Image (cartoon, rainbow, N blue to C red):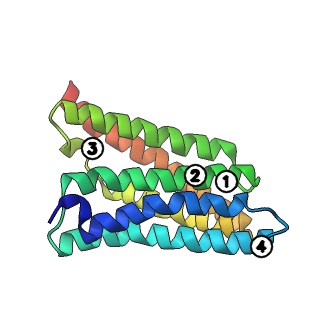
Amino acid sequence: MDKKFTLPTMLTWFRIASVPFFVAVYCLPDATISIQHKNYLATTIFIFAAITDYFDGYLARLLKQESSFGAFLDPVADKALVASALIILIQLHRTFISAAIIIIVREITISALREWMAQLGNTKSTAVHYMGKLKTTLQFCAITLLLLDNHTNILGNVFMVLAVIFTIISMLYYLEQAKKYTS
């Protein structure tokens, strides 16, 4: 079977394909759908997309369908989903612009680092680590709570601060790991 069309990879493609639908919810006229209904619909889309992040990796390992293409595509899907959600949350004034900037800059930095390490022939130093998984989980939790905006802004922003802390820690971890192979 083509590695681009395995069940795990299709879940990752679903996550990418969900991004325009997620964003489109907030582009609908307020006369068409209330902000509360937009929040619920966008949160539902976001949660389903976020859940695929767990299942695509789990199924790839379970079904022995891990591939370099899937390993490449998975973080792309995460970054597209998280970056679009952060932009929406900033537009809605539900979280800190500094948090969004830190998270997006980290994602770009680590993507560039992974590409550079691949050119050097060393991808193991920047392979996904539990710190990165924890960072993603905290980001998904924060974004979900902030999208609901149903008296969850304080808790959502507590999670956002934790996500930013782990975003920075995981970036420093990956930079340190890569440094070992470039000195």
* Residue type for callout 2: Ser
Pointer 4 or 2: first along the chain: 4
Q: Which residue is most to the right?
A: 31
**Cα–Cα span, label 2 and label 3:** 24 Å
Residue ID at (33%, 59%): 130
**Cα–Cα span, label 4 and label 3:** 40 Å
Secondary element at tag 4: helix
Pointer 2 or 3: first along the chain: 2
* Crowd rating for badge 2 (residues with CA inside 10 Å; few <14, some 14–19, many 20+): some
Horizontal relation, residue 52 to residue 70: left or right = right
Where is residue 45? Give x, y as percent.
56, 70
Q: Which residue is tagged 1?
A: 88
Asked whether residue 22 is in view, the answer is yes
Q: Which residue is tagged 2?
A: 84
Horizontal relation, residue 129 to residue 51: left or right = left
Where is residue 126? Give x, y as percent.
27, 44
* Residue type for callout 4: Gln
**Cα–Cα span, label 1 and label 3:** 29 Å
Residue 126, numbered circle: 3
**Cα–Cα span, label 4 and label 2:** 19 Å
Q: Is residue 131 above or below residue 107?
A: below
Q: Quadrant of the C terminus?
A: top left
When asked about the image quadrant of residue 43, the answer is bottom right
Q: Are marks 2 and 1 in contact (CB under 8 Å)?
A: yes
**Cα–Cα span, label 1 and label 4:** 15 Å
Q: Which residue is most to the top?
A: 183
Secondary element at tag 1: helix
Asked whether residue 166 is in view, the answer is no
Q: Are marks 2 and 3 in contact (CB under 8 Å)?
A: no
Q: Which residue is tagged 4?
A: 36
Pointer 4 or 3: first along the chain: 4
